[in-house]
Image (cartoon, rainbow, N blue to C red):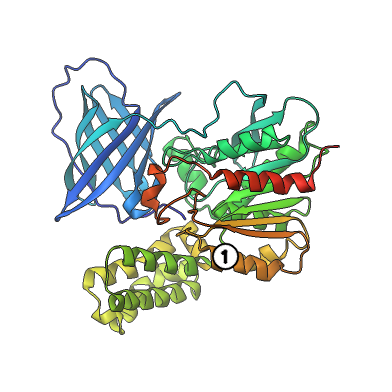
């Protein structure tokens, strides 16, 4: 789900340490724990070198925050400054010998000291390493949306025509072509497996990835799933126009939000030959959000009665969002919050908790993606797949897109299609990793990027439909 949360607590305005340090690079994975009011919040900042300097992402596993890209990263040895505009947060620290950054994290006027320690990036056993026994090409292509240029990697079998071609579409949040998160590169793993089996695969960076802050705002501030669907269709057009793939069946494989996009894109483009939905959301977003919030409250140890009262208020908030346009929400948010706050059970909730839940009205009014996510029902787009081949899969321990609810919805909408395959994988999470609980906090600790049985199931499903000549 979209990781543009604003609940992350803030941090620090730093007393810089002496700058007489030898030249060093801040690139790496940096872990720290933010302490506040007797609580602690683990954070991870990943810094990578890019042509223009450095890029960074922020992760907070306990809050489900992953891959939030920094707007700016400034490094003038030893001083490091990172800004996260989506959180209105900044980190400022000094890079020290021994793999440490001493600094402060600042957000909403609050400051807290934060010590970061560097750890070596995990070498994932599934991550493919060159040389590859297939062709890799860098490609650029336009989205079907005006003014959006996308960049990606096309992999092709070394010999002969591909059996079919596949566009890979990432989940929510700003991600690169490998859908890289928590040290895993699932789309690199999928592309490698499928290309070795004779398929062409195009994976691409999300719009705005690695772009300057001003360009990200232009591309993302008002973007919704509909806009990202036009990007996926631009990738489809790219494959359809290439000499290597023009005669191939071409389909779309998406993960999470990308799984929903695969259906929406196919509804708009009859030439999409097949769909693979990996943990794609098949119900309206507010239903998924309510389930996720209930789960989070349970994990935080809230008693059952308080959890039910919070969820009742959330349902009322979602109903108001569905019944108003964004413009109406902007104009009426204060009045709506007062009215909802005066009713039970909201009136009996702790004020801070009640305020946080009501704040969602402002978030939906201010953020186009959030509003669209909460109000959009993909049922019509899913039904439009008709009798085209569809593979829909989920893990039974997926805590973000519930397997039973979403696979059941797809089965109900497409149950008459002889080309529908629906499968749940026991004990796998939202990333299709073997896990204990399915919670986000486990993702990085799990060595497996994608369970081998999932990779084989996707490849075998394609093989039965696109046999070599």
Give me the residue at 31% from left, 22% from top: 25
Looking at this view, is 463 or 151 the one in front?
A: 463
Vertical position of residue 352 compared to residue 110: above or below: below
Q: Residues within 10 Å of mark 1 (few under 14, many from 20)?
A: many
Where is residue 452 shown, x and y percent of the image?
57, 43
Q: Position of residue 140 (x, y in %)?
A: 64, 32
The answer to whether residue 137 shows anywhere in this view is: yes
Which residue is denoted by mark 1 in the rendering? 406
Q: What residue sits 46% from the left and 76% below the top?
A: 319
Residue 285 rendering spot, x and y as whole percentages: 51, 65
Q: Position of residue 361 (x, y in %)?
A: 39, 68
Residue 160 relative to residue 224: left or right: right
Q: Is residue 318 above or below residue 463?
A: below
Quarter holding the C terminus is top right
**Mark 1 falls on what kind of element?**
helix
Observer-nearest residue: 174 or 306? 306
- Give the answer, above or below, for where 290 lies relative to 441: below
Residue lying farthest to the top in this orientation: 22
Q: Residue at x 68, y 32 (%)?
A: 196
């Amino acid at each position: 789900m979209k990781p543009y949360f604003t609940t992350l607590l803030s941090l620090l305005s730093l007393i810089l340490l002496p700058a007489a340090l030898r030249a060093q690079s801040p690139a790496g994975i940096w872990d720290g724990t933010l302490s506040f009011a007797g609580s602690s919040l683990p954070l991870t900042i990943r810094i990578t070198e890019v042509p223009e300097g450095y890029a960074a992402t922020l992760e907070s596993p306990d809050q489900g925050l992953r891959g939030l890209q920094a707007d700016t990263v400034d490094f003038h040895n030893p001083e490091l400054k990172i800004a996260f505009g989506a959180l209105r947060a900044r980190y400022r620290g000094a890079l020290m010998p021994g793999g440490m950054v001493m600094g402060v994290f600042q957000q909403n006027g609050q400051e807290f000291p934060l010590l970061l320690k560097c750890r070596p990036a995990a070498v994932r056993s599934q991550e493919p390493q060159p040389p590859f026994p297939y062709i890799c090409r860098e490609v650029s292509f336009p989205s079907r949306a005006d003014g959006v240029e996308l960049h990606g990697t096309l992999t092709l079998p070394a010999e002969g025509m591909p059996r079919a071609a596949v566009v890979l579409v990432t989940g929510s949040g700003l991600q690169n072509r490998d859908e890289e998160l928590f040290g895993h590169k699932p789309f690199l793993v999928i592309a490698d497996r499928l290309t070795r089996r004779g398929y062409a695969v195009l994976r691409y960076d999300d719009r705005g990835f690695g772009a300057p802050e001003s360009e990200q705002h232009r591309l993302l501030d008002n973007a919704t799933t509909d806009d990202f669907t036009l990007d996926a269709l631009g990738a489809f057009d790219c494959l359809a126009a290439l000499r290597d793939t023009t005669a191939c069946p071409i389909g779309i494989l998406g993960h999470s939000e990308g799984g929903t996009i695969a259906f929406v894109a196919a509804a708009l483009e009859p030439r999409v030959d097949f769909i693979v939905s990996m943990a794609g959301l098949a119900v309206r977003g507010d239903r998924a959000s309510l389930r996720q919030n209930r789960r989070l409250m349970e994990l935080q140890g809230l008693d059952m009665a308080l959890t039910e009262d919070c969820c009742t208020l959330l349902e009322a908030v979602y109903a108001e969002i569905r019944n108003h346009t964004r413009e109406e929400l902007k104009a009426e948010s204060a009045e709506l919050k007062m009215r909802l706050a005066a009713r039970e059970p909201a009136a009996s909730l702790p004020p801070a908790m009640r305020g946080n839940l009501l704040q969602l009205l402002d978030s939906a009014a201010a953020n186009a993606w959030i509003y669209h996510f909460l109000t959009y029902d993909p049922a019509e787009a899913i039904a439009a797949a008709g009798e085209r081949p569809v593979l829909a899969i989920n893990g039974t321990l997926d805590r973000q897109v519930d397997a039973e609810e979403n696979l059941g919805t797809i089965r109900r909408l497409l149950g008459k299609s002889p080309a529908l395959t629906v499968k749940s994988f026991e004990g796998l999470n939202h990333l299709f990793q073997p896990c204990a609980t399915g919670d986000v906090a486990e993702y990085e600790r799990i060595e497996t990027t994608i369970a081998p049985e999932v990779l084989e199931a996707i490849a075998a499903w394609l093989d039965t439909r696109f046999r070599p000549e």
